[in-house]
Amino acid sequence: MAGKPLVAVTRIIPEAGLSVLRERTEIRLWEEEMPPDPEELGELLTGAAGALTLLTDVIDGAVLDREPQLKVISNFAVGYDNVDVEAATERGVAVCNTPGVLTETTADFAWTLMMAAARRVVESVEYVRAGQWKTWGPTLLLGRDIHGATIGIVGFGRIGKEMARRARGFDMRILAYDTHQDDEGAAEFGVEFRPLDDLLRESDFVTLHVALTPETTHLIGARELGLMKPEAVLVNASRGPVVDTAALVAALRDGEIWAAGLDVTDPEPLPPDHPLITMPNAIVVPHTASATVATRDNMAALAAKNLLAVLDGEMPPEIVNPEVLKRQ
């Protein structure tokens, strides 16, 4: 290939990734805070050999057909539900992602949400800021114990296992549900596998760590929330559509469950007047589970390495559809 290949980067990412790309490629960078709309994304991708994308960038067959020169879509995320992987594979386009480098950080934050919801941390801060703190009281802002409780981990992959590791330190009983039952991992962390309904009935804390697929969309809906304990806490650090938002609002409002901690929502972002934002028993944060300096640097560097490896005709560190490169 004569000269540097052109790559499209659909948002400003940490220099740990951009600097690597600048050395080897010509970058066309989207510098706005908001993601490009479909027309703007099309212009950004025009003539590019590779694209470093975010979850907000929809890459489907129609997009790929307009840019047949594209060789690789490198997603700055573990998930890749924004990319039609089947369409990419049919067209010989490699799809890459960034698993592993954010596992512990995401588990840390999911645990933070769980503890904050259980102990009513946000409510307590707002109580003090509003000038309501007059004295110590025996029944003031009572929360739920985490130590010795039962945690149900839905999705026993990398992050789910890290949640189990943390739960052991709190002497929790650990249940898990996954379509693939990892008996070796269960033995390592002292986990008991359960059907989803049984896990929901038995758990004091339910934490979601599944990929978004047609099968997991609304995995937690009105029926599932109705199975949970009235004192249970739900944590979602996977993808917003895994939970039926309207059903969750109703469950929190009616006391079917006690609280929720949400890193992700559906829609995302939530409109400012959405009931979840004002509910005292819901903690909503703006999809920041992996948001530490070190982790975002590592994600950027890995996304760049993935992209460059494909352009060099090599197998990248992380690829979703390796059969594309094996064919080549």
Image (spheres, rainbow, N blue to C red):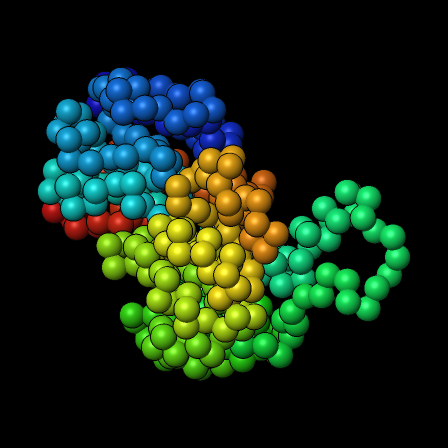
From the top left corner, tell me how far across and down residue 24 is, in percent: 37, 26
Count the marks: how many? 0
- Residue 180 visible somewhere in the drawing: yes
Of 154 and 202, the residue lying toward us: 202
- Say left or right for 1 vs 304: left
Residue 67 location, quadrant: top left
- Say left or right for 227 vs 81: right
Of 148 and 310, the residue lying toward us: 148
From the top left corner, tell me how far across and down residue 192 is, in percent: 43, 81
Of 27 and 244, the residue lying toward us: 244
Q: Residue at x 21, y 42 (%)?
A: 84
- Residue 283 visible somewhere in the drawing: no
- Say left or right for 35 vs 328: right
Q: Which residue is drawn at 29% across and 41% down?
A: 82
Q: Which residue sits furthest front? A: 254
Residue 39 location, quadrant: top left
Q: Residue at x 44, y 46 (%)?
A: 265
From the top left corner, tell me how far across and down residue 298 is, in percent: 49, 43
The N terminus sits in image quarter: top left
* 108 to 78, vertically: above or below: below
Q: Residue at x 45, y 71 (%)?
A: 228
- Say left or right for 29 vs 112: left
The C terminus sits in image quarter: top left
